[in-house]
Amino acid sequence: MTHSVSVCIPTYRRPALVKAAVESALAQQYPSLEIVVSDDSPDDRTEVALADLITSRRVRYVRNRPPLRQAGNVNQLFDLATGEFLVLLHDDDLLVPGAIARLLACFEADPSIAAAFGKQYLMNQQGVVDEAASAALNVAYWRVAARAGRQAQPLESALVAQFPNDGFMVRTAIARQVRYRDTAVVGDACDLDFGLRLAAVSEAFYFLDEYTASYRSTEVSITVAHNYTHLTFDLLRSVELPAELEPVRLIQLQKYATPAVNCWLARGDWAASSRVYWSAGYGWRNRLSLKGWVQGALLLCPPALSRRLVAMLRRLRDAIVSSADWAGLASE
């Protein structure tokens, strides 16, 4: 039986990158496939960039006036999708050839699952894949051979971000049921929020131990990731979990605690920073580390001073990251 699939691509002011994303979907060579692009851009550059592709019956393009913003844009795609299954693909990422057929095979192998996903390649702004960094990325998010197959604890999968922000395949009906929550509620952590709430209503996920998507690391994606860790921390702390997953929650909270304190300090919110710093999620080992001592000292400073100091530390961090990226490009 041939199942229908919709590849859903929300986009905003990335004409060249979204064109590459659409082309990666068209290259799947799957017979019952549509690609739906929902564009929040304020200009027509994306429509112009996609003009030749839109003529295909397999590609639908929608321009949003006024813009729907992140959650609204994704939810519109869920509503527009005509496929039994959908794949959410960010406009700067790519599908690996054959990904659609291989993800569908997971549902045929186990009809009880709500979603399936594979490993992600990590590529730079220019689309060059870093094999070593890709392997490390997947190990960090539990996407390894030992964990392949049915994920009977989907909440655990979502909690540790094994379930990715995009590139996954999900039953369209369930995606419409769960939907994205507005950024006014969950901020820029809406991808993680969707994964957690999807897991809460699902019997199981499926991890395919094969590469199915390529994640592009851009200056924007790095900045956003650094700037909403406080929201991620709060979301992980508030989600309802069975008792057996509490140790996993604690590990994840400890991962995000230090950057969460920095985020709140940068916003001048001493109370929120202090709440994270003294929480169980921060932990005494972290407090007694060099970073812990520094953050403790920042909390003793007047809010205006601590905000300036955090901004200086972030500029230093970004300069180091930028230098490393240039060094990497020079060696390619």
Image: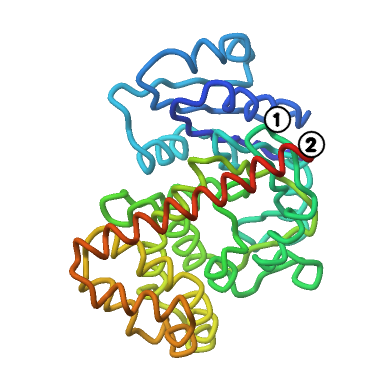
Seen from the viewer's position, the closer of residues 102 and 284 is 284
Q: Which mark is residue 138?
A: none
Q: Which residue is mark 1?
A: 24
* Quarter of the image that includes the N terminus: top right
Q: Residue at x 54, y 28 (%)?
A: 36
Quarter of the image with the C terminus in it: top right
Callout count: 2
Q: Quadrant of residue 56?
A: top right
Q: Is residue 85 visible?
A: no
Q: Residue at x 62, y 9 (%)?
A: 52
Secondary element type, mark 2: loop
**Residue 245 picture location, percent across and down:** 53, 83
Inspect this view and state whether residue 332 appears: yes
Residue depicted at x 57% and y 50%: 321
Name the amino acid type tagged 1.
Answer: Ser
Image: 96 above or below 166: above
In the rendered structure, which amino acid carries the disc numbered 2? Answer: Pro
- Position of residue 67 measured from the top left corner of the image (x, y, whole percent): 32, 28
Question: x%, y% of residue 100?
Answer: 73, 41
CA distance for labels 1 and 2: 7 Å
Q: Is residue 305 left or right of residue 114?
A: left
Question: In front: 54, or 166?
Answer: 166
238 over 108 or under it: above or below: below
User: In the picture provided, is 10 more to the left or to the right than 86?
Assistant: left
The answer to whether mark 1 and mark 2 are in CB contact below 8 A is yes
Q: Secondary structure at mark 1?
A: helix
Question: Looking at the image, what colour scheme do you see?
Answer: rainbow
Near mark 2 (Cα within 10 A), the count class, few <14, some 14-19 or many ≥20, is some
Front residue of 263/63: it is 263
Q: Which residue is mark 2?
A: 97
User: Foreground residue, 149 or 214?
Assistant: 214
**Image side of residue 331 versus residue 41, left or right:** right
